[in-house]
């Protein structure tokens, strides 16, 4: 879980567009971010296993 100050700082408009940081909206993590869902890999896995993300199922073969 990222600190509240870091999350607030990343929400501000940066001086240059390349400084923009994508963060998970649930926990604030910046690494392992999935653009399609707006989540980090950890939160994505938790929600997908619970069936809370529409159209996503656990694969098995």
Image (tube, rainbow, N blue to C red):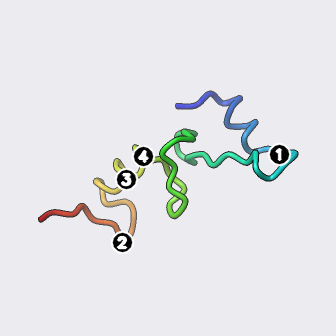
The span from disc 1 to disc 3 (Cα, nearest Å) is 30 Å
Q: Residues within 10 Å of mark 2 (few under 14, many from 20)?
A: few
Q: Residues within 10 Å of mark 1 (few under 14, many from 20)?
A: few
Tally the marks. 4
| Residue denoted by label 3 | 47
Tell me the SS state at disc 2: loop
The part of the image, by quadrant, that contains residue 30 is top right
Q: Residue at x 54, y 56 (%)?
A: 38
Tell me the SS state at disc 4: helix
Q: Position of residue 35 (x, y in %)?
A: 55, 59
Q: Is residue 54 above or below residue 23?
A: below
Q: Residue at x 30, y 54 (%)?
A: 50
- State the mark number for residue 55: 2
Near-viewer residue (51 or 23): 23
The mark nearer the N terminus, 2 or 3, is 3
Q: Are marks 1 and 3 in contact (CB under 8 Å)?
A: no
The span from disc 2 to disc 1 (Cα, nearest Å) is 34 Å
The span from disc 2 to disc 3 (Cα, nearest Å) is 12 Å
The mark nearer the N terminus, 2 or 1, is 1
Q: Nearer the viewer, mark 1 or mark 3?
A: 1
- State the mark number for residue 14: 1
Q: Are marks 4 and 2 in contact (CB under 8 Å)?
A: no
Q: Nearer the viewer, mark 4 or mark 1?
A: 1
| Residue denoted by label 4 | 43
The span from disc 4 to disc 1 (Cα, nearest Å) is 26 Å
The mark nearer the N terminus, 4 or 1, is 1
Is the C terminus in the top left, top right, bottom left or bottom right quadrant?
bottom left
Tell me the SS state at disc 1: loop
């Amino acid at each position: 879980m990222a600190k509240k100050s870091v999350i607030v700082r990343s929400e501000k408009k940066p001086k240059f567009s390349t400084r923009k940081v994508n963060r998970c909206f649930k926990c604030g993590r910046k690494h392992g971010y999935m653009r399609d869902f707006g989540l980090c890999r950890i939160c994505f896995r938790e929600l997908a296993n619970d069936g809370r993300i529409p159209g996503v199922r656990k694969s098995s073969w």
